[in-house]
Structure formats: structure tokens, C-alpha cells
Image (cartoon, helix red, strand yellow):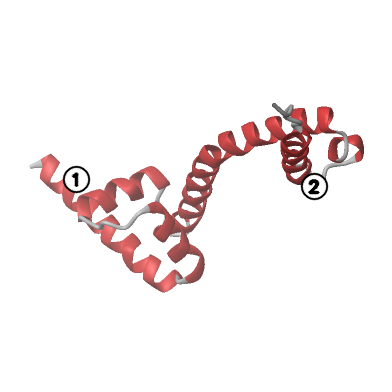
């Protein structure tokens, strides 16, 4: 029986890692043993940051909404309370986009939210 030489398999595995390490600096891009560590760490970062990106964008949207709302004398939390009370089912991503790109539409939403807040205060007082 002929012996099995595994050079082809090993070379393919090495080539796959080296290909993933393209763009790294120094031996990290060329030396297999170093490249494998760097690639594994990069994949860990990529996995973690796919989830992190969602958090970061939500924070950005909240900042943009807050900046847009403060022009009309409201805070972010009061505005979101008013949005919920008014039954406006628009998510933060769209609200932030409206605040930045379509100020007139956003202004109308702010006034609707303000009216809902005022109505809630009247209901609560009665």
C-alpha cells in the first residue's frame, strides 16, 4: 500500500489562512504560525463587533434625535414618551434620518408628540 503524503492538504490549509491575513503588516501576513494567531483574533473582533455595531448605531440615532428635538424645547426622553403616546410607530433609525434630512417632517412629528404629552398631562390632572 502506498503511503499518503499530506503536503497538498497542509499547503491548502496554510494558503487559506495566509489569504485571510492579506493586508496585515510584517510577518503577520506571510508567516503561517503568526498569521493564524492574528487571523483568529481578527475573527473574534469581527464576531464581537457585529453585535457592537448595532449598539453604536442606536446610540448615534439617539444623539441625532436628541439634537433635533432640543431645537423645539424638548428632551429626547420626553419626545419618545410623546411619540409612544401619539401612537407614532417610527423607529429611531428613521426618526434620526428625518431629523437630519427632512427637518419639516421631523418638526411635524415633534409637534404631534408635544400635543400627546400635553393631552397626557390634562388626562392625568383630571
| Mark 1 lies on residue | 121
Q: Residue at x 25, y 49 (%)?
A: 84
| Label number found at residue 91 | none
Image spot of residue 69 (x, y percent): 43, 56
**Position of residue 85 in the picture relative to residue 111 (left or right):** left
Label 1: state its secondary structure.
helix
Q: In the rendered image of this protein, does residue 5 appear above or below residue 114? A: above
**96 or 6, which lies in front?**
6
Q: In the rendered image of this protein, does residue 41 appear above or below residue 18? A: above
| Label number found at residue 22 | 2
For the image, the number of numbered tags is: 2
Q: Looking at the figure, which quarter contains the C terminus?
A: top left
Q: Are dots 2 and 1 in contact, CB under 8 Å?
A: no
Q: Residue at x 71, y 36 (%)?
A: 9
Residue 86, by quadrant, is bottom left
Image spot of residue 107 (x, y percent): 38, 67
Image spot of residue 12 (x, y percent): 73, 41
Q: CA distance from mark 2 to mark 1?
A: 61 Å
Mark 2 vs 1, N-terminal side? 2
As drawn, the residue found furthest toward the left would be 126
As drawn, the residue found furthest toward the front would be 1
Q: Residue at x 70, y 30 (%)?
A: 41
**45 or 62, which lies in front?**
45
Label 2: state its secondary structure.
loop
Other-residue count near label 1 (Cα within 10 Å), few / some / many at <14 / 14–19 / ≥20: few
- Discs 2/1, front: 2
Other-residue count near label 2 (Cα within 10 Å), few / some / many at <14 / 14–19 / ≥20: few
**69 or 40, which lies in front?**
40
Q: Looking at the figure, which quarter contains the N terminus?
A: top right
Q: Residue at x 13, y 41 (%)?
A: 125
Amino acid at each position: 500500500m502506498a503511503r499518503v503524503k499530506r503536503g497538498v492538504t497542509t499547503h491548502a490549509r496554510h494558503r487559506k489562512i495566509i489569504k485571510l491575513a492579506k493586508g496585515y503588516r510584517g510577518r503577520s501576513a506571510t508567516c503561517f504560525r503568526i498569521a493564524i494567531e492574528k487571523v483568529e483574533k481578527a475573527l473574534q473582533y469581527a464576531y464581537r463587533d457585529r453585535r457592537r455595531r448595532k449598539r453604536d448605531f442606536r446610540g448615534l440615532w439617539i444623539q441625532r434625535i436628541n439634537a433635533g428635538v432640543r431645537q423645539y424645547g424638548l428632551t429626547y426622553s420626553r419626545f419618545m414618551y410623546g411619540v409612544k403616546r401619539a401612537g407614532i410607530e417610527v423607529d429611531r433609525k428613521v426618526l434620526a434620518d428625518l431629523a437630519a434630512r427632512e427637518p419639516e417632517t421631523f418638526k411635524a412629528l415633534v409637534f404631534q408628540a408635544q400635543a400627546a404629552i400635553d393631552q397626557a398631562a390634562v388626562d392625568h390632572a383630571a
